[in-house]
Image (spheres, rainbow, N blue to C red):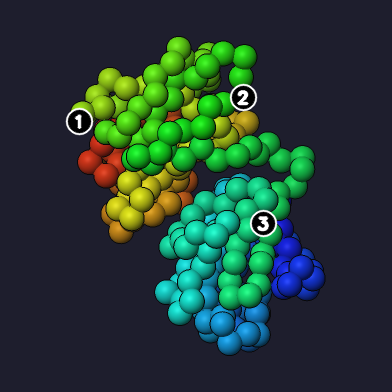
Amino acid sequence: MGKLVISMDGVVIKEVQITKDKTTLGRRPYNDIVIDNLAVSGEHAALQMAGADVFIEDLNSTNGTYINGKAVKKQLLSHNDTIEIGKYKIKYLVDPGADYEATQILRPGDVAPRPAAPAPAYQQSGFGGPTSLDPLVHAAASIKVLNGAAAGREVSLVKVVTTIGKPGVQVASITKRPVGYVFAHVEGAARPTVNGKPLVTETLQLKDGDVIELAGTQMQFINR
């Protein structure tokens, strides 16, 4: 279970356990977390739980919501992320007993981080973007691109959370859980499809052979 540690000028003000599906932050008294400061909008941001994952979404605030110094509209939170709202810093922490690692984000133009494994990984920075190819680690699952310029590329799901798609257009995540791999919609007006059907629930457990379509790119989930 995650929690938020709220501080200002290095002084911790309060700690809040995340227990609700949706937790709102803002200056107005009806918010779940009230931050009484003029730099904070009445309804500033919201935290949304999707299984064990927690997303933060800026609610069109005046001064914006920042994660580790970068402005975000909606983003999956990782352990130890720092949310900045006005002069307040909110540290997101996950229970040390949880099976959680740093997020691997696949975005056009970025190089995916190399996993800490005895052998190098077969990595891809983003579908259609620059790619670094190495021998494939013996991973439990992967995704294979079926169309476009990157057709045939295969990306090993070596992290607990892999985020795929085009930021600002359509983004989804694949999360490794003890029961398997879970697919979730993160960003974009249009929802991704799995086997030709739009994702209507918050999350969906993937099966070997499932075909995902996201931002015009088709990918097959492989878990043999």
Name the residue carrying label 1. 148
Residue drawn at the location 39% of the way across and 19% of the way down = 133
Q: Secondary structure at mark 2?
A: loop
Name the residue carrying label 3. 92
Q: Amino acid at mark 2?
A: Ala
Location of residue 211 (image quadrant): top left
Residue 26 locus on image (x, y percent): 58, 78
167 left or right of 44 in image: left
Q: Mark 1, residues whose alpha carbon is within 10 Å: few (<14), some, or many (≥20)? A: few
Does 4 appear above or below 94? below
Sequence-wise first label, 2 or 3: 3
Residue drawn at the location 28% of the way across and 20% of the way down = 152
Does 116 appear above or below 88? above
C-alpha span from label 2 to label 1: 30 Å
Does 147 appear above or below 1? above
Sequence-wise first label, 1 or 3: 3
Q: Is residue 223 visible?
A: no
Nearer to the camera, 95 or 178: 95
Q: Residue 116 shows which numbered tag?
A: 2
